[in-house]
């Protein structure tokens, strides 16, 4: 019984270690200066892998992501600021290389669409709620769509309702 518990614990530990996130940055990419390496890692988290597209180059194992990580480190070693490194990569690969695009005239629609969609959806829900709460609000007189015979019958029914002792 004891060996079975030990085997289960070892299996659970192995599964947990296997579930740990893999680091895409290889040891030969790491810069000697810890401050520069930290800058490179932060920049790599902001840049999109052009192959994986929804991963940063810091997380991606694609060969192009490795090339971009090396390029970032090369530019940092050359003395470029973070802004210069980002500008260099945007000039080379376009705005798509950024995981969070900049706000400018080309990306204005991209940035404004979500809040506008939320506002329009909220307005539509508000209108629907008002319409369900007060059905006569949008249609005016509720008897307007009735024929003259139907309106006369409706008046008789309402009058009969107010005087229950009269037969219909």
Image (cartoon, grey):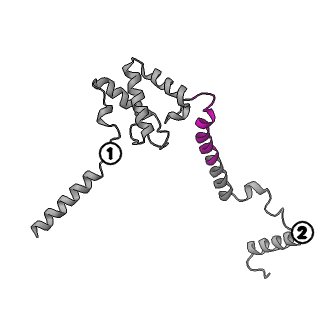
* 111 to the left or right of 7: right
Name the residue at 46% across, 39% down: 49
- Quarter that holds the C terminus: bottom right
* Residue at the limit of the structure toward the right, as seen here: 148
Measured from the top left, where is residue 41 in percent x and y?
36, 31
Q: Give the range drawn in magenta.
A: 103-121
Is residue 56 visible in the rendered image? The answer is no
Q: Mark 1 points at which residue?
A: 22
- Quarter that holds the N terminus: bottom left
In front of the other: 43 or 164: 43
Q: Residues within 10 Å of mark 1 (few under 14, many from 20)?
A: few
Q: Mark 2 points at which residue?
A: 148
Name the residue at 66% across, 54% down: 128
Q: How far apart are marks 1 and 2 (CA)?
A: 77 Å
Measured from the top left, where is residue 107 in percent x and y?
60, 32
* Residue at the limit of the structure toward the top, as seen here: 79
Quarter assignment of residue 111: top right
């Amino acid at each position: 019984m004891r060996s079975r518990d030990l085997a289960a614990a070892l299996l659970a530990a192995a599964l947990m270690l296997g579930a740990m996130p893999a680091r895409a940055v290889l040891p030969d990419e790491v810069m000697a200066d810890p401050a520069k390496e930290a800058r490179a890692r932060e920049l790599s988290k902001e840049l999109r892998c052009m192959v994986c597209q929804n991963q940063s180059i810091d997380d991606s194992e694609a060969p192009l992501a490795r090339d971009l990580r090396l390029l970032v480190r090369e530019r940092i070693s050359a003395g470029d600021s973070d802004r210069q490194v980002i500008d260099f990569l945007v000039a080379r690969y376009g705005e798509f290389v950024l995981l969070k695009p900049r706000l400018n005239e080309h990306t204005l629609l991209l940035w404004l669409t979500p809040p506008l969609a939320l506002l329009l959806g909220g307005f539509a829900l508000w209108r629907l709620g008002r319409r369900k709460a007060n059905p006569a609000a949008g249609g005016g007189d509720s008897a307007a769509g009735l024929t003259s015979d139907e309106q006369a019958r409706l008046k008789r029914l309402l009058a009969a309702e107010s005087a229950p002792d009269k037969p219909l």
